[in-house]
Image (tube, rainbow, N blue to C red):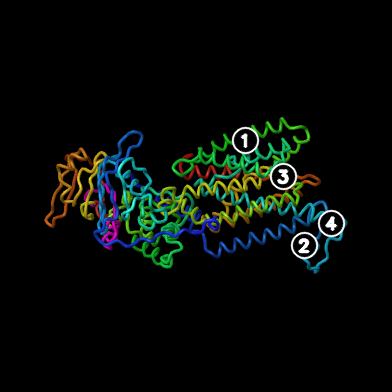
Amino acid sequence: MTASPTQQSRRDARIRANAADLGLAARTPRVTAFTFIVLAAGLIVMTVVSASLGQLIIPFDQVLGSVLDKIGLHWLQGPSRAFGEEALWNVRFPRIVMAIVVGAALGVAGALMQGVFGNPLAEPGTVGVSSGAAVGASCSILMGWDFLGALTTPALAFACGLFTTLSVYLLARRDGRTEVVTLILTGVAVNAVAGALISFCTFAAPTSARDQIVFWQMGSFNGSRWNQVALVAPMCVVGVIAVQFMAHRLDLLALGEKPARHLGVDVERLRFRSMLVVALLVSSAVAFCGIIAFVGLVVPHLLRIIIGPGHRALLPASALGGALLLTIADFAARTTIRFADLPIGMLTSLVGGPFFFWLLRRSRSKSGGWA
Amino acid sequence: MNILNPRRTHRPPVPPQPGDIVLELDGVGIEIDCRTILNRIDLDIRAGELLAIAGPNGAGKSTMLGAITGDVPVTSGSISLFGEPIAAWDATELAMRRSVLMQNVDVTFPFTVDDIVRMGRSPWEGTPDELDDDMIVASAMAMTESMSLAERVYTSLSGGERGRAAFSRVLAQAAPILLLDEPTAAMDVKHQEMLMRLGRDYAEAGCAVVVIVHALDAAAAWSDRVALLERGRIAALGTPEEVFTSARLSAVYQCPIEVLRRGDGSLVILPERPAVSRHVYGRRQTIHGKET
């Protein structure tokens, strides 16, 4: 059967729309540079805004003055209100830096997982890596363990996170790719088991620890302290830098496992290192701030549309984008309702859930099935 | 992570002389789930030749190619590349020596054709050859007539266009051995012929080309030698004139096939077809765009 002229032209239009949607967009170095500048500028602006607003309002110039003061430049007046300096340096800045660090970690972890799984729907939260790491952290909170000192909670989160990452990876892949159905169902199973273990920890915990576990589980930057930042930030920085060295090989992995090997990629090694980095990034994010889902899904996806799928630009952009998103989300969590600090994990899931669903529908209509 | 593990040096390939054995299969047998897929295959592939592999579905053609690329483990026998067993080379050294085009290459993310072809250059990253990347990528795309596809997203291409883009990537890899698994499957006649001619040119430049093809007359026209596979063993190996005889093809494919020799010596290979009685229901027919 031959297509009628109208069918033909409709199909042409669809192909053209597809092309515009997917690629013939202006993915030039100029666009990439512009994106980086916008993200970095946004992050700086948000940091100042978030530091300045809240229950105690500290004007922008006083925030800047206080920061400059710390690095030895006395150009601007510091906070004039009582407790302003304390509010800035003991409450707001550790919290903002934590949001930046965790956001960067989650953004990069999402982009990395998508590259390794060969599936744009892979993400630490949906696949269950976050809840896996959370099991380790809640055990540590429940038992009050401190055999590794302050490192105990992040270390346990890392161990459980790595175990979950590796099992998801082994369970969900076939021939170097992950079908959407398999990935989602693996996520359901892993989240169920991890959820059950966390529930058990909550159940078994004494009342005081119970509150701690429940609130921590919902994800929040409330109460972040410098000593926590000092533990989490190096893990995250190591992860974000390590991932840059894999960027080019991750691109080749998009061709499939065998073609990547034919081009000289040691696929097994790349895979194992990636899993290690994912576990490191996710556990550093989860250890003190709980489960913050969907950042790793939304950020790399949007950036891929703007700057293209090449990992050399996508990975650092995802770090910036994740940091920006979480600074904004944390600001919203802090200020939307007066005198209430909303759990940030709740906010990201509220926005991320529908986005995930939209992506799922889109990938179904594109591949003509759930495969 | 490379900081901890400084770049190992990879042995660069030495260009082979025409006639050198570049690939040698010695008594190769492969069993998968207790089923014999390949049975004692002996084959040597030399620089400067285009070897076509033909045979019915399930004869073991792709498995044989998989064994040569190192993807399918060999149960018995050995395969050597440039005189050394495959395991003696690391992944990058292998990639500098042989490029592989598999059936249906799918790409996960919306990379453009230009990105994809450029990926073919990655084994040469950090070597002096890297300087020629742009030129090699451009000429590979020009050869396969896929320049116009450069900015298109690979996943939005038709099957034949994907085939051309993927073939450009393999050409850009510039390895002395080219392994192609049914590269012409989704292509129209013009591009089928173009691809086989490019394979021919590649071989004539002193490289070895191995192509799995189903179109027997294309194999006859373009190859130096043909290996005809039948149920895991080589039924015949030699020039197309020696291998493609009516009796042998009919027996291997279990279907009557006629081989005709034309005046210029070229072969015409046709399955024997019964005369059909045609039914023309509509009265309108179009010939040369005019309705009759």
Q: Residue at x 16, y 54 (%)?
A: B266
Tell me if A58 is positioned left or right of B33 in this view.
Answer: right
Q: Secondary structure at mark 1?
A: helix
Assess whether residue B212 is covered by the magenta stretch.
yes
Q: Are marks 2 and 4 on the same chain?
A: yes
The residue indicated by pointer 2 is A67
Give the structural element (helix, strand or loop) at label 3. helix
Q: Earlier in the sequence, mark 2 or mark 4?
A: 2
Question: Would you say residue B225 sits in the magenta stretch?
Answer: no
Residue B113 point in image, percent of width and height = 43, 57
Left or right relative to A133: residue B22: left
Label 4 resides on the chain identified as A
Which residue matches tag 1? A194
Image spot of residue B277 (x, y percent)? 18, 39
Q: Earlier in the sequence, mark 4 or mark 1?
A: 4
Could you give the CA–CA distance between mark 1 and mark 2, rounded to whole angstroms?
Answer: 42 Å
The subunit letter for the residue under badge 1 reads A
Q: Amino acid at mark 3?
A: Gly
Give how far apart the Cα atoms at labels 3 and 2 are.
31 Å
Task: State the mark number for residue A84.
Answer: 4
Question: Within 10 Å of the Cα at label 3, are there few (<14), some (14-19), or many (20+) other Cα atoms?
Answer: few
Q: Closer to the camera: disc 3 or disc 2?
A: 3
The residues tagged by marks 2 and 4 sit, at their Cα atoms, a distance apart of 12 Å
